[in-house]
Every structure is written in C-alpha cells, then in structure tokens.
Amino acid sequence: MTRPTSATADWRDAIDSFSHDGPGGDEVLAAQHPDLMAALQELTPDDEPLKIGGESVTRQTDGSWRVGRDRNLASPWVVVQSLRSSRHRYPRHGRSWRGRLRAPRDERGYAAVELLAMTTVLVGFITVVVGGGRIVDSNSQVDDAAYAAARAASLESSFDAGQIAGRDAAEDALADRGKACTRLTVSFAGTDFRTSGHVRVEVTCHANLSDVVGFGLPGAKDFTSTAVVPIEQYRRLP
C-alpha cells in the first residue's frame, strides 16, 4: 500500500485543521483531505497500524476501522471524528485541566446514539405502563364477572340451574368489557344452595398478554377472583 509521505500530508495538521460547514460525510472529507481518505481506504487488516495524529488506526477483517478503543467504525468520516474526539480526551500538549474543561466537546455523530437510547427507554416505559394497566384492568373485570356469576346463580331455583346461569353471566360480563379469555373456569365449590344459604363462585380467566410481552411481563396470565352472594332468607326453594 502506498501512503502519502509527510511532504504531502501532515496527519496531525489534517485532523486539527479539518473543518466544514453544513452536513459532513465521506464526500466532504475526500474533498478536503483526499490523501487521508485514500490512506484509510487502502489500509488492510494485514498492514501495520496507520499513525494519524498520534493514534493507531487499523483495519478490521469486516472492512471497518479501529481507533484506539473505538471499534467497528464504518466509514472514514467516523474514523476522523473518533480521532478528533481522542485528541480532546487525551491532549498531547500539556493542556491544563482548566483548559480541558473549557474546551468545546465534539459531539458530532453521537446524536443518533442518544436518540436510539432515548427511544429504547421510552418504548420500555410505555410497554411497562400498558402492561401494568392491562393487568390491573383484567383483575377488575374478573372481579365483576365473579360477582355477576354469583348473583345470577343465587336467583335460580336449583343448584344445577344456578351453575348454568352463573357461567353464562360470567361469560357475558367479560364479553361486555371486551375481555377475551383463552380458557375460562367457573367453580361453585363451597356453595350452600338452600334458603338463607349462599352461592360461592370462583372465576379464573386465562388471558393472552403476548401483545405487551417484554420487560419482565408474562405472555399469558391467570386472573382469579371469588365472590359470595347470600340466598334470600325467605325464598322458598324446592
């Protein structure tokens, strides 16, 4: 590989003096420093590190570049930004700590990373809020369905008729609230179906939450609620 000599290119000055107006990119770099662009593009993984402004630049096997600890730099433009950033972080001319603090930071190229991080956090927050709301609302709906089932069963004249009416009432209550259960269980265990007795109903709804899965939320969950409704004291039952 033929690299520009020091007579045609001073790498340190090229990095320090590089400036542009408007959007940047490889085209801007090639227009102002074609020798630097050519040296970066001709660099291969088998070559010795290319010293630019005191930093070692190497080519990776996937075609990207590496500057110091910065890996997978996809274009010469990004390589130059990494070099400039390294010069700000690790000055080589004995600049005082006050001068380093006052020096402007070169943050070009980091806006996309910040946007990605903010978007990830925002999506995670929305997912947790929506998932938590779904769980709270599902518990409330199953509570209503259990009470509706117990109330409907208590108005029937027999235990068998009460079980049928109670199950239908639970299904209707969940359907009216827009709740779809992949599996619905209505149990009347503990019911004392007689005058002055009571109806005890336990409703279990197996709900699909795959649309809000993630961030620790389950893909499916069982929601269970129990309701007890007394049978009127003066009712005459068979």
Image (tube, grey):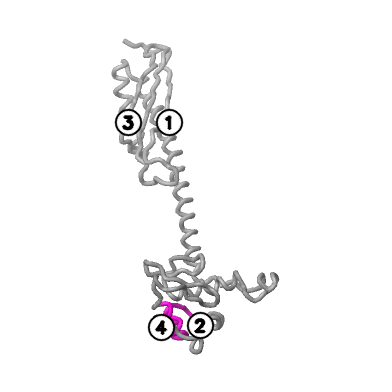
The mark nearer the N terminus, 4 or 2, is 4
What is the spatial separation of the Cα atoms under label 4 and label 2, in whole angstroms?
Answer: 31 Å
Q: Amino acid at mark 4?
A: Thr
Q: Quadrant of the C terminus?
A: top left
Q: Which residues are magenta?
A: 18-40
Q: Amino acid at mark 2?
A: Asp
**Image quadrant assignment for residue 217:** top left
Residues packed near mark 3 inside 10 Å, few (<14), some (14 to 19) or many (20 plus) = some
State the residue position of label 4.
Answer: 2
What is the spatial separation of the Cα atoms under label 2 and label 1, in whole angstroms?
Answer: 64 Å
* Residue 83 against residue 221 in the figure, above or below: below
What is the spatial separation of the Cα atoms under label 3 and label 1, in whole angstroms?
Answer: 13 Å
Q: Amino acid at mark 3?
A: Leu
State the residue position of label 2.
Answer: 21
* Secondary element at image label 4: loop
Residue at 48% of width from left, 89% of height from top? 8
Q: Give yes or no for contact between labels 4 and 1 (Cβ–Cβ under 8 Å).
A: no
The mark nearer the N terminus, 3 or 1, is 1
Q: Which is in the foreground here, disc 2 or disc 1?
A: 2
Q: Is residue 15 left or right of residue 123?
A: right
State the residue position of label 3.
Answer: 184
What is the spatial separation of the Cα atoms under label 4 and label 1, in whole angstroms?
Answer: 78 Å
Residue at 45% of width from left, 85% of height from top? 4
Residue 27 belongs to magenta span: yes
* Secondary element at image label 2: loop
The mark nearer the N terminus, 3 or 2, is 2
Give residue 206's position: percent from left, percent from top: 35, 34
* Secondary element at image label 3: strand
The mark nearer the N terminus, 2 or 1, is 2
The mark nearer the N terminus, 3 or 4, is 4
Q: Give yes or no for contact between labels 3 and 1 (Cβ–Cβ under 8 Å).
A: no
State the residue position of label 1.
Answer: 143
